């Protein structure tokens, strides 16, 4: 069964046909290729299998650009500009709730994917360009592209023979020399190509693609980028792909063996494997970005269960409210970030350990006016940001240090003590401790003055 087709509406009222395949840790947007048709793609076995493989790497969002396949046709001789194609990407991403995605540009969609990544880096998690070039015309200052003679010959054949089975047999053989095409496969490809449009429409699209040149924006791409190209691709030059890689800072180039231009023909396993490896490296890198050094502070009311039992519910809730007001006020004063309330305590983080210690001392002193004792533990380490929460071993250590502290005591790890040298804070050795669930023994220190 083919995946269900939906339509996203652009601001201009154009309806873009899309489908969603698979699920995973990363969204992957595939804005089609030169003869895209998301409804008929599944009738071409290798193309359908290729899409399923990409869908196994993440949530694949596959759509037909305006003017093609199941998307709205464009009347009045209009052509889909790069700007309008980028609007199509945004509309589809918004329709499926995708904030950021890897953009997969192939064949004719490669230049648009490059421009999208440069224009909308906040929506682009990564860029993958396969079998494409930033410029389609051969010029003295560009090593790739087609010559004028090749373009003229291509257009003459296209206008005279587009739609004919024999033409498509030759056309596909150039795009995928390794493909052994039976009559059923030829029928599937022929139908898919014909659905792109008549000779006039296809020639107009090809002329637009010829005039597209995104070389000037390559240096403006600052997202993780992978460029893949098969060594003897018969349609696009590997020299053009290498040119793109050289001009996109930090990009990676992978040369794949083979002559097939179509991604789903030839050794697709190697191609998908390289894309999967790249996606994993992007996710690992982003995980690094989500780790920051912070001082973690845990506070806890000593004997809260006994106090709650001794007071009426209303009085206990009023006391807790006063406690929370005092703690939050001091967190704001010392520029701490409240992560969460723990019922009878708080988890907070600071970007400076000395401020965290002074805030802890101020909290311990201030709540005593409420006839409350708190225990407070602090540790500085790398934490993982997870939305508004923090995670990681540093958080566990801070919690265990806090659990060991006594009434009105601020206890810190040796890391905190070492980082605040010269701050005027004084500490007393509290001995070595085995922290539950944490490897090794830890030397802790009691803050004695601030």
Image: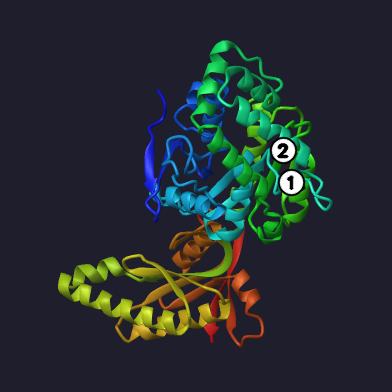
Helix, strand or loop for disc 2: helix
Counting labels gives: 2
**The residue positioned farthest toward the right in the image shown:** 140
Callouts 2 and 1 close, C-beta under 8 Å? yes
Q: Residue drawn at (53%, 86%), measured in percent from left and top?
A: 449
Residue 58: assigned label? none
Helix, strand or loop for disc 1: loop
Whether residue 119 is visible here, answered yes or no, is yes
Sequence-earlier tag: 2 or 1: 1
List x then y, in percent, for residue 101: 52, 49
Nearest-to-viewer mark from 2 and 1:
2
Say which of 15 and 205 sits in front.
205
Classify mark 1: residues with Cα within 10 Å, few (<14), some (14-19) or many (20+): many
> Is residue 199 shown left or right of residue 418?
left
Say which of 276 and 401 sits in front.
276
Q: Residue drawn at (53%, 83%), measured in percent from left and top?
A: 448
> Is residue 218 shown left or right of residue 295?
right
Up-down relation of residue 76 to residue 83 (above or below)? above
List x then y, in percent, for residue 245: 75, 49
Residue 151: assigned label? 2
Q: Residue drawn at (46%, 34%), measured in percent from left and top?
A: 69
List x then y, in percent, for residue 352: 57, 77
Q: Residue drawn at (21%, 73%), measured in percent from left and top?
A: 316
**In what quadrant of the picture does the C terminus appear?**
bottom right
Up-down relation of residue 287 to residue 359 (above or below)? above
List x then y, in percent, for residue 12: 40, 55
Classify mark 2: residues with Cα within 10 Å, few (<14), some (14-19) or many (20+): some
- Residue corresponding to mark 1: 137
User: What's the CA distance linking mark 2 and mark 1?
Assistant: 9 Å
């Amino acid at each position: 069964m083919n995946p269900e087709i939906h339509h996203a509406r652009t601001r201009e009222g154009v309806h873009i046909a899309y489908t969603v395949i698979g699920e995973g840790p990363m969204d992957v947007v595939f804005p089609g290729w030169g003869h895209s048709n998301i409804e008929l793609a599944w009738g071409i076995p290798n193309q359908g299998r290729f899409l399923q493989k990409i869908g196994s790497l993440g949530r694949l969002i596959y759509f037909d650009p305006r003017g093609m396949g199941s998307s709205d046709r464009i009347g009045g001789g209009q052509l889909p500009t790069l700007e309008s194609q980028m609007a199509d990407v945004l509309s589809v991403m918004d329709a499926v709730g995708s904030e950021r995605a890897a953009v997969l540009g192939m064949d004719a969609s490669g230049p648009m994917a490059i421009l999208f990544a440069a224009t909308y880096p906040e929506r682009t998690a990564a860029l993958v360009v396969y079998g494409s070039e930033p410029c389609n015309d051969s010029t003295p200052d560009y090593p790739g592209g087609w010559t004028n003679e090749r373009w003229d010959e291509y257009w003459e054949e296209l206008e005279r023979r587009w739609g004919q089975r024999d033409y498509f047999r030759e056309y596909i053989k150039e795009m995928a020399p390794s493909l052994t095409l039976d009559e059923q496969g030829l029928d599937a490809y022929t139908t898919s190509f014909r659905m792109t449009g008549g000779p006039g429409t296809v020639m107009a699209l090809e002329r637009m693609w010829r005039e597209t040149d995104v070389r000037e924006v390559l240096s403006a791409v600052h997202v993780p980028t992978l460029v893949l190209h098969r060594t003897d691709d018969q349609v696009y030059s590997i020299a053009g792909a290498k040119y793109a890689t050289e001009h996109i800072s930090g990009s990676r180039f992978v040369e794949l063996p083979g002559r097939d231009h179509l991604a789903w023909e030839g050794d697709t396993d190697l191609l998908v494997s390289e894309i999967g490896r790249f996606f994993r490296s992007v996710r690992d890198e982003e995980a690094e970005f989500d780790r920051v050094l912070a001082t973690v502070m845990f506070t806890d009311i000593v004997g809260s269960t006994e106090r709650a039992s001794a007071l009426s519910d209303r009085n206990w809730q009023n006391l807790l409210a006063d406690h929370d007001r005092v703690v939050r006020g001091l967190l704001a004063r010392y520029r701490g970030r409240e992560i969460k309330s723990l019922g009878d305590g708080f988890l907070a983080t600071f970007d400076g350990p000395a401020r965290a210690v002074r805030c802890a001392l101020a909290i311990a002193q201030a709540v005593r006016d409420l006839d409350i004792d708190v225990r407070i533990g602090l540790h500085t380490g790398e934490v993982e940001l997870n939305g508004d929460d923090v995670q990681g071993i540093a958080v566990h250590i801070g919690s265990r240090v806090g659990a060991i502290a006594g009434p009105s005591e601020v206890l810190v790890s040796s890391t905190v003590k070492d980082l605040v040298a010269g701050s005027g804070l004084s500490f007393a050795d509290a001995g070595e401790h085995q922290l539950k669930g944490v490897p090794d023994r830890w030397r802790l220190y009691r803050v004695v003055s601030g």
